[in-house]
Image (tube, coloured by chain):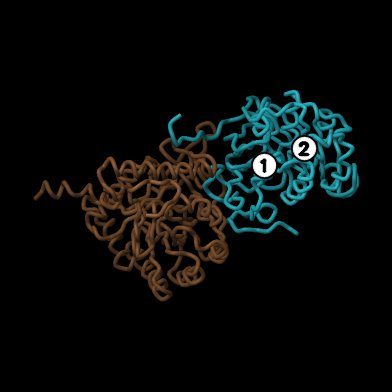
Amino acid sequence: MAEGIRPGHKEFIISETKDIADGLREFTFEKGLAVEPGQYVMAWIPGASENPLSVRSGYPFKLAVKKRGGWSEAFHRKQTGDSVFVRGPYGRGFTGFIDRYDIPSSTPVIGIAGGYGSVPVLSALEYLEANGFSVLRAMLGAKTRSGLLYLEEFWEKLQEESVLAATEDGSEGRQGMVTGLFENWHELGISGEAEPYFLVCGPEKMIRAAAQEAERHTAPERILVSLERYMKCGHGICGNCEEDGLSVCQDGPVFPYSELAGNRAFGIYERTKSGRRENYDL
Amino acid sequence: MHERAGDRGKIDLSYTLRGLVFDPAIMNASGFLCYPSVLKRYESCLGGLVTKSTGIKEKEGNETPIVACSGQGWINAVGLPNPGIRGMAEELKELYPFRVPLILSVFANTVEEIPELIGRSYGCCDAYELNVSCPNIKEGETTGIAIGMDHGLVGDFTRAAVEQAKERGGKPVIVKLTPALYIADDIRKTRTLKTAQAAVEAGAAALACINTVPGGMVIDIYAREPVLSARYGGMSGPGIRPIGVGMTYAIHEAFPDIPIIGCGGIETPEHAVEYVEAGASAVQIGSALFSREGTLEKTGFIDGFTRELAALCERLGVAELSELRGAAHGRRHQARA
């Protein structure tokens, strides 16, 4: 490929749609896409704009879309046989960090997901399970039971006893925030000598709180957090997704927590469409 | 010459503009990197930093898609999103001063907006780049290229900015020009030179040449739609370099004393030297950053670029990049003599 050329969108035809929960719809496509769990694509609905989406799986290629505005509503109107135009995948995912070093498959890996974060976390745990990792756990959090996305899939892959859930209204599992589940840490049966990996995804303040808890159980290099930012270009150019100068779209979206030490944006602010900084709610 | 990353031995790649030292004489083009926190990560490799173009008030810019690869570069219709001068100044104040000169790019719809733009930011930048060339404006908007197509307006806006800067201490105002007039110009480049002259006579410290080439379109033949939501966008990258080089050459030929910052399609040190020999004193790099993925690759690219530029200067037999300025004009004069 000539220097400087970056492929544009490719057409993907929908072969199946499935409603998961809470306005989340899963789209399966006829063609597959080589994706590392934790990476994302820019999905273009001609006439409606393009937005980043964490990939649910590569083979088959699946995207999960939450309905909450113009672009996602246009996406939800698409049916089997319709097309979506996708470029990517982009960014550093979860499993590349684990693949890169010869991590023994007995290493415990704990996924921590809040809300939509279930998508990349489940995708990564499925990959690890298929590659012989035997000690897999999940801590899931949401406002209410219906927000625990893919709960049944987590139970199926990991066995129910390996999945801890927390809901703010107590409708499933422990009442409270997902970080409260660390008080049930002993239930996960992870040896004190182990150096587990954590895969964390969800609202940024949740990620920061969860990572701080996870640090009591492992080194910060082994806590992988997936950040979400409004991305306009996906090429590290427009600066909208910047995290104290790092590009979430290219340097991330997954970062080892150790790389975010001292980061002036992490858990503090994100940028709106205009690029104005906006602090997260306290 | 001080020791910095991208060490280039004894070759002087610097350029000094009214006391501001750009070492190396390489900056990012406006619209790339954009925000102070991002620019900060490049202050050890670039010799100058240019912010995203900032206006009086907050602006969201265009709906995505905003960029598309053309195969010879890129087209963009980003649409000047920015947090407004207050927001940008607030961010700059947290980090200013940087290790290298920080140029605040500004755009205005009327000359009446200039005092507030300069006034709110004067203390947190080293120079201004007046954007009278962005083609991504909406119908009825009077900024960017709407100014740049009219040499009278270029003069008016430049004069206003220069006066405001002068009142406060005289930080340099660089004027970034559009190639649109040049592309349609007559053989003598009349309109191009008239515009350059207007900026210079109004007090511009330097001209940045060029902004994007307007009117580019990329169609996705499967979607059967233009990719950009705005349909048309400004062209950048290697495909436009001859336009930038040509316009630099034309301006330098007519006004050899005017500092020019060359911009447009620079990918290699050879391209940078091409601009310098055309008449530029420094260069800006933008689209070359598209294809380097991640902060480490982007900064590494600039470090490598700088080292190779020094090596190229050595091969060309010069100890200073500035010795090559305008070198492509010499032989013609000799031949005619």
Could you say which is closer to the camera, residue B300 or residue A36? B300
- On the picture, is B250 further left or further right than A184? left
Quarter residue B100 falls in: bottom left
Could you say which chain is coloured brown in the image? Answer: B
| Figure colour of chain A | cyan
Tell me the element at label 1.
strand
Name the spot of residue A197 as percent of width and height, x first: 74, 36
Quarter residue B61 falls in: bottom right
Quarter residue B199 falls in: bottom left
Q: Residue at coordinates 31% horizontally, 41% vertically from top-left?
A: B312
User: Can residue B106 be seen in this snapshot?
Assistant: yes
Tell me the element at label 2.
strand
- On the picture, is A146 further left or further right than A48? right
Q: Residue at coordinates 37% horizontally, 66% vertically from top-left?
A: B158
Check disc 2 and report the residue beneath it: A111
Name the spot of residue B195 as percent of width and height, x first: 30, 60
Q: Residue at coordinates 57% horizontally, 35% vertically from top-left?
A: A87
Q: Amino acid at mark 1?
A: Pro
